[in-house]
Amino acid sequence: MMQYKVVTRKNPINKTKKFYPALVSPQPVDKTKIIERIEKRCTLASADVKAVLDALEVELIDCLQEGWSVRLGDFGSFRVSLRTKGKDKAEDVQAEHILSTHVVFTPSPRIRRALSVKSKAVKFVRQGEETDKKAAKPAGGVTPAPVPGA
């Protein structure tokens, strides 16, 4: 279950304020915890899972540095995008106008369905409100992960 809080945002044009739900910053799950969780779901030892994740990280970096996109089946895909400075003429554009890069992750349809609000696959609770510990399994057949450290 995801927690949200209420935030105020101003319209930049007419300066009116409105209230919106915004996700509460979650506690991150580190690689060690992911390794433990994967180890429980398969026959691999934690050292083997760690080795695979380490190799995946290295290969992902190498492929992205080559300018390739990386598609990982039912997981999703990664690609590099640029933040740049624009110029008035095409002939004025230089590599120096690339300010930074960032990685764009596009989830697979399976992951998008697992996080679908429309199909009620994910549940939300306002921050500070009690959650029902015996919540029903969401649509899409994906069991939510327990809160780290809980």
Image (cartoon, rainbow, N blue to C red):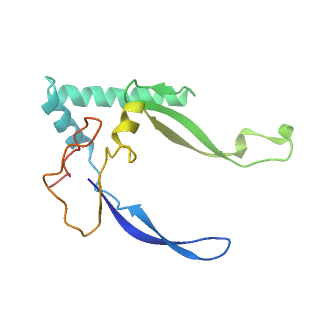
Q: Residue at x 47, y 26 (%)?
A: 70
- Judging depth in this view, the residue of 57 and 28 nearest the camera is 28
Q: How far from the left and from the top, in percent, is residue 9? A: 52, 71
Q: How far from the left and from the top, in percent, is residue 95? A: 71, 39
Left or right of 126: which side holds 134?
left
Q: Residue at x 25, y 35 (%)?
A: 141
Q: Is residue 76 above or below residue 145?
A: above
Residue 41 occupies which quadrant of the picture? top left
- Judging depth in this view, the residue of 52 and 121 nearest the camera is 121
Left or right of 25: which side holds 36?
left
Q: Is residue 114 above or below residue 42?
A: below
Left or right of 22: which side holds 130?
left
Tell me the quadrant of the picture where the C terminus can be found: bottom left
Q: How far from the left and from the top, in percent, is residue 87? A: 81, 47
Q: Residue furthest front?
A: 119
Q: Residue at x 37, y 30 (%)?
A: 75
Q: Is residue 120 above or below residue 132?
A: above
The image shows a total of numbered marks equal to 0
Q: Is residue 12 above or below residue 54?
A: below
Q: Residue at x 41, y 62 (%)?
A: 22
Residue 74 occupies which quadrant of the picture? top left
- Judging depth in this view, the residue of 114 and 104 nearest the camera is 114
Residue 36 occupies which quadrant of the picture? top left
